[in-house]
C-alpha cells in the first residue's frame, strides 16, 4: 500500500508535479534538468502562493462561522483543516475534468477557479441574485458549488475546455453514484468511435472525475456500490476520502471495519491481470507528499482509466463539524491538542520555515493579507446582498408614509411597523412582506388610494420574490420538453400489426442507428436484449458499449445515467421492474429532481429512466407506487404510456429536450398487438396532454397505463346498460393536463371517476386534486366524484391475487352504476 510517512525533505520534493521537471534539490540550490525552465524563485513563489491560498480559505472559514453566530447567515459548514490537501488536489484538475464533491471543498473550489471568496459569502448569505451566487442563487447552503453545462438556447457548452462541477448536495455519499457516471462517460468517449466528433464534450476520454467524501460517509451503501461498480467498469474515477477520525461526534472505530477505509478496501486493490482500483494513503498535512501521491494516482487514472482511491488521513477540524455545535463536547483534551499541532496550515508553515522558503516575517505578511482578502470578499458579498433589501425597505417606508399623510386607517399600527422596519439593521425580505400584508389585512379593500398603492406594492414584491425562490423546477424555453412540437403518428392503410415489444425493438434499432449520443444499459439489457426483448439482437448490431449489461445495482445504474447525462450523453438507464425503483430513488429525488431548481436553471441532467410496471403477478413484480414517485420526484417528467407506440413517441419527445423523465411501460402490454407507425422515429407524443380514447356523455373516467384496458372491458358491459362513458388517458402524471382539458369533459358529463392501481390516496388522489381543486371541477358535479384504486396492501401472487388486489372489471362497473343511480 502506497503511504506517505511525513514531509518530504526539500531535496525530494516532486517539482515535476506542478512545474517543470527538476532532477534534485540539494542545500536549497537547484540542480535542474537541462530542459527545465524552472528556477528556484519560481518554485518558491508557487509554494508561497499555495500557502497564501490556504490562509485565505482558513480565514473564510473563521469569518463564515462568525457570520452565522452573529445572525447574518443561517447555517455554516466549512472546509477548515483540508486546505493543503485540496490545494494539492486542484493542481491536477484539468479542463474537461468533473468534480462530484461535497460541502467541505471550498479550498478546492478557490484553487481550481470554480469559486471566489465573494461568491462563497454570497451563497452563505443566501443571496438570490444568480450573478452573486452563480451556483444556486441563494437556494443552497454554502459550499454547494456547480457549473453550467447547457445554455438557454439548448446548446451544450464546451465542457472539454471548462473545469466542471456537478451541483453539490448535502445528503451524505449522495455524490458517489453520479461520480461513477461522470467517469464512465470518459470511458465511452475514448472507446466509442462515433463519439470522437464531439470534441466540445471530451478530448478522447482524458477527463477524470474527482469525487470527495468524508471518511464517515464511506459507511453508506452508496460508497460501496459505487466503488464496486468502478472497479468492475474500470473508469477514471479518483476518490479522495477526507479522514478526520469522526462522523460528527462518532469516532471512526464505530464507523468502519478495522477503523480504516483503505484497510477495509484492500480486497478491491487492482493487481496484475485483475480489475479493481489503486489505493494510496497520505497525510492531510503533508504538502509535498500530497502533491507527489496525487500526481502519480491521478495521472494513472487519466492515462489508463484505472480508478483510484486516496485515503487522506490525519485531517483536522479546527472549528468542529459545523456551526450547530462544538467539538469540545466529544473530543478529549489530548485529541484537541493533537489537532492543533497537526493543523495542516501550521504544518505547512513549519515546512516553509525549515526549508528556508520564507522567513517568519514574510509568512506573517501573507497571513495578514489573507485576513484582508477574506474580509473584503465578505464585505462585498454582504453589501451586494443587503442593498436591494434596503431599497425595498425604503419603498415600503414611502408607502407607509403616504398612508400616514392621508390620515386614514390604523395610523398607529402603520407607524409602529415603520419604526420596527427602519430600526432593523439586517432586514429580511420576509420582514417587508409580512409588514405590508399586516397593513393590508387590517384595512378593507379600496379603503384609500395610499392603501391601494400598498396592495400593488405588495403584489409586485411577492411576484418578484416568487421569481427568486419558486422558479425553475423544470427547464424552460429550448430545453423544455413542453416546447417540443407534436408530430402525430402516421399509419399506412395496411400497417403491420406487431407485438408491443417488437414495436419497441424496431424503434430502438432506428434510434441507435441515427443518434450516436444515446446509450442504454441495465440488468439484462445487453446480451439478451432486456427481459421483455425490447433490445433483442441490438447489442450485437450496435455494440456492447452502446447497449450494455450492468450488475444488480439500481442505485448506481441511476448514478451512471446521471453522470453521463451531465456530460452531454443521452442515457436510457433501465430499472428492470418499477418495484425496484426504491433502490434508485434517492439520487433521482435528491439530485435529478431538484437539479434545475437548486441551480436556478443553469445545470441540466436529461437522463431517461426506462422501467416497466403495473399489473402482472406477485408482490414485487406488479407494483404501481405512483404516489411515491410523483411526490418524491417533482422536477422529473413521469410518463405512463398505455402501449409501446405511445412509449416510442414519448422517447422521441424527451430526446429533443434536455429534461429528465421516467417512462413506465406496461408490463402486461409487451405481447399485445399494435399497429406500426410509418414515422416511428419522428412522431412525438406531447407531455401533459391527455387523450380522449372514447367519447361519451354520462360519465368521465380518467386513468392511465394498464388499467385503461380494464376500463375499456367494463365499458362494453356498461354500454349494454345504455351508459355512455368518456375515457381519458392522462398519458403523463407529471406534467398533468396542462391545458385543463379533463374539466371540459366533466362539464359535459357532470360525473367523474378516477381509476388507477396504486394504493388509495395516491395516484387517484393526485388526479382528483388537480381536476377538482386546480381546475375547479367541483362546480360541474351532479354527484360526488369517486376514486377507485387498489387495495392498501401489496398485490397478492397469482391470477386470483391480482383480481382481489387491484381494480377489476366488475369493480369499475359497480362504481359507475352507483354513480349513475345516485
Image (tube, rainbow, N blue to C red):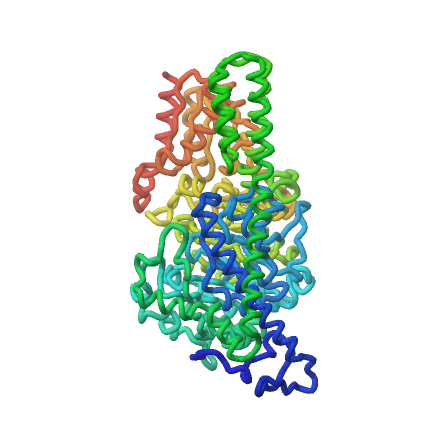
Q: Is residue 157 left or right of residue 413?
A: right
Task: Report the number of discs.
Answer: 0
- Residue 82 in the image: state x and y as whole percent: 47, 64
Task: From the viewer's side, name the closer residue of 411 and 786.
Answer: 411
Q: Is residue 761 left or right of residue 503?
A: left
Task: From the viewer's side, name the closer residue of 601 and 273.
Answer: 601
- Residue 802 in the image: state x and y as whole percent: 33, 41
Residue at point 31%, 43% (across, down): 794
Q: Is residue 10 above or below residue 287?
A: below
Residue at point 41%, 54% (across, down): 322
Q: Is residue 503 visible?
A: no
- Residue 752 in the image: state x and y as whole percent: 44, 24
| The N terminus sits in image quarter | bottom left
| The C terminus sits in image quarter | top left
Q: Is residue 585 above or below residue 412?
A: below
Task: From the viewer's side, name the closer residue of 432 and 162.
Answer: 432
Q: Is residue 631 visible?
A: yes
Q: Is residue 26 above or below residue 444?
A: below
Question: Farthest residue toward the front?
Answer: 361
- Residue 641 in the image: state x and y as whole percent: 51, 41
Residue at point 49%, 53% (across, down): 63
Amino acid at each position: 500500500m502506497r503511504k506517505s510517512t511525513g514531509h518530504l525533505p526539500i531535496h525530494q520534493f516532486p517539482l515535476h508535479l506542478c512545474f517543470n521537471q527538476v532532477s534534485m534539490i540539494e542545500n536549497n540550490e537547484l540542480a535542474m534538468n537541462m530542459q527545465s525552465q524552472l528556477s528556484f524563485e519560481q518554485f518558491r513563489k508557487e509554494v508561497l502562493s499555495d500557502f497564501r491560498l490556504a490562509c485565505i480559505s482558513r480565514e473564510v472559514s473563521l469569518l463564515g462561522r462568525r457570520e452565522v453566530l452573529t445572525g447574518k447567515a443561517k447555517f455554516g459548514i466549512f472546509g477548515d483543516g483540508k486546505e493543503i490537501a485540496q490545494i494539492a488536489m486542484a493542481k491536477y484538475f484539468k479542463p474537461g475534468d468533473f468534480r462530484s464533491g461535497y460541502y467541505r471543498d471550498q479550498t478546492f473550489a478557490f484553487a481550481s477557479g470554480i469559486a471566489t471568496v465573494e461568491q462563497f459569502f454570497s451563497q452563505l448569505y443566501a443571496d438570490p441574485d444568480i450573478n452573486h451566487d452563480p451556483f444556486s442563487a441563494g437556494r443552497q447552503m454554502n459550499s454547494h458549488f456547480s457549473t453550467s453545462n447547457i445554455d438557454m438556447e439548448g446548446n451544450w457548452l464546451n465542457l472539454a475546455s471548462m473545469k466542471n462541477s456537478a451541483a453539490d448536495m448535502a445528503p451524505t455519499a449522495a455524490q458517489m453514484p453520479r461520480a461513477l457516471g461522470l467517469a464512465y462517460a470518459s470511458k465511452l468517449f475514448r472507446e466509442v468511435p462515433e463519439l470522437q466528433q464531439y470534441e466540445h464534450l471530451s478530448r478522447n476520454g482524458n477527463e477524470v472525475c474527482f469525487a470527495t467524501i468524508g471518511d464517515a460517509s464511506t459507511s453508506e451503501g452508496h460508497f460501496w456500490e459505487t466503488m464496486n461498480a468502478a472497479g468492475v467498469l474500470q473508469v477514471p474515477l479518483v476518490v479522495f476520502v477526507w479522514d478526520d477520525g469522526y462522523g460528527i461526534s462518532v469516532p471512526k472505530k464505530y464507523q468502519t471495519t478495522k477503523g480504516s477505509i483503505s484497510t477495509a478496501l484492500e480486497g478491491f486493490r487492482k493487481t496484475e491481470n485483475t480489475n479493481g482500483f489503486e489505493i494510496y494513503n497520505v497525510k492531510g498535512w503533508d504538502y509535498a507528499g500530497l502533491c507527489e501521491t496525487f500526481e502519480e494516482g491521478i495521472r494513472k487514472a487519466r492515462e489508463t482509466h484505472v480508478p483510484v482511491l486516496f485515503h487522506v488521513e490525519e485531517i483536522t477540524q479546527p472549528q468542529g463539524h459545523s456551526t450547530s455545535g462544538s467539538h469540545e463536547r466529544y473530543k478529549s483534551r489530548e485529541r484537541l491538542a493533537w489537532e492543533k499541532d497537526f493543523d495542516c496550515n501550521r504544518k505547512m508553515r513549519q515546512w516553509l520555515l525549515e526549508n528556508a522558503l520564507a522567513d517568519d516575517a514574510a509568512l506573517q505578511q501573507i497571513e495578514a493579507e489573507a485576513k484582508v482578502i477574506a474580509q473584503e470578499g465578505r464585505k462585498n458579498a454582504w453589501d451586494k446582498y443587503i442593498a436591494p433589501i434596503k431599497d425595498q425597505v425604503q419603498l415600503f417606508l414611502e408607502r407607509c408614509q403616504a398612508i400616514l399623510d392621508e390620515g386614514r386607517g390604523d395610523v398607529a399600527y402603520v407607524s409602529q411597523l415603520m419604526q420596527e422596519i427602519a430600526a432593523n439593521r439586517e432586514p429580511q425580505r420576509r420582514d417587508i412582506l409580512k409588514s405590508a400584508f399586516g397593513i393590508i389585512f387590517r384595512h378593507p379593500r379600496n379603503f384609500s388610494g395610499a392603501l391601494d398603492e400598498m396592495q400593488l406594492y405588495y403584489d409586485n414584491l411577492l411576484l418578484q420574490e416568487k421569481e427568486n425562490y419558486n422558479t425553475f423546477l423544470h427547464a424552460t424555453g429550448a430545453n423544455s420538453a413542453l416546447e417540443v412540437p407534436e408530430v402525430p403518428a402516421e399509419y399506412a392503410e395496411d400497417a403491420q400489426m406487431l407485438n408491443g415489444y417488437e414495436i419497441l425493438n424496431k424503434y430502438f434499432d432506428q434510434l441507435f442507428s441515427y443518434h450516436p449520443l444515446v446509450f442504454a444499459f441495465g440488468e439484462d439489457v445487453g446480451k439478451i436484449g432486456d427481459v421483455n426483448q425490447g433490445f433483442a439482437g441490438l447489442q450485437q448490431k450496435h455494440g456492447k458499449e452502446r447497449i450494455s449489461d450492468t450488475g444488480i445495482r439500481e442505485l448506481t445504474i441511476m448514478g451512471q445515467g446521471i453522470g453521463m447525462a451531465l456530460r452531454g450523453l443521452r442515457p436510457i438507464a433501465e430499472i428492470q421492474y418499477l418495484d425496484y425503483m426504491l433502490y434508485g430513488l434517492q439520487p433521482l429525488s435528491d439530485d435529478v429532481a431538484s437539479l434545475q431548481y437548486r441551480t436556478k436553471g443553469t445545470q441540466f441532467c436529461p437522463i431517461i429512466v426506462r422501467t416497466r410496471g403495473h399489473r402482472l403477478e406477485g408482490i414485487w413484480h406488479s407494483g404501481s407506487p405512483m404516489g411515491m414517485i410523483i411526490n418524491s420526484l417533482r422536477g422529473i417528467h413521469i410518463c405512463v404510456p398505455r402501449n409501446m407506440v405511445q412509449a416510442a413517441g414519448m422517447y422521441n419527445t424527451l430526446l429533443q429536450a434536455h429534461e429528465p423523465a421516467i417512462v413506465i411501460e406496461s408490463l402486461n402490454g409487451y405481447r399485445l398487438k399494435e399497429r406500426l407507425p410509418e414515422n416511428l422515429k419522428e412522431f412525438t407524443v406531447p407531455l401533459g396532454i391527455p387523450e380522449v380514447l372514447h367519447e361519451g356523455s354520462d360519465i368521465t373516467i380518467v386513468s392511465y397505463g394498464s388499467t385503461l384496458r380494464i376500463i375499456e372491458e367494463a365499458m362494453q358491459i356498461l354500454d349494454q346498460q345504455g351508459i355512455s362513458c368518456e375515457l381519458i388517458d392522462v398519458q403523463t402524471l407529471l406534467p398533468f393536463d396542462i391545458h385543463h382539458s379533463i374539466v371540459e369533459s366533466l362539464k359535459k358529463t357532470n360525473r367523474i371517476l378516477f381509476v388507477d392501481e396504486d394504493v388509495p390516496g395516491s395516484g387517484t388522489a393526485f388526479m382528483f386534486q388537480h381536476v377538482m381543486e386546480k381546475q375547479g371541477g367541483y362546480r360541474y358535479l351532479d354527484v360526488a366524484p369517486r376514486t377507485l384504486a387498489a387495495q392498501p396492501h401489496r398485490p397478492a401472487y397469482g391470477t386470483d391475487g391480482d383480481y382481489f388486489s387491484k381494480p377489476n372489471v366488475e369493480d369499475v362497473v359497480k362504481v359507475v352504476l352507483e354513480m349513475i343511480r345516485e
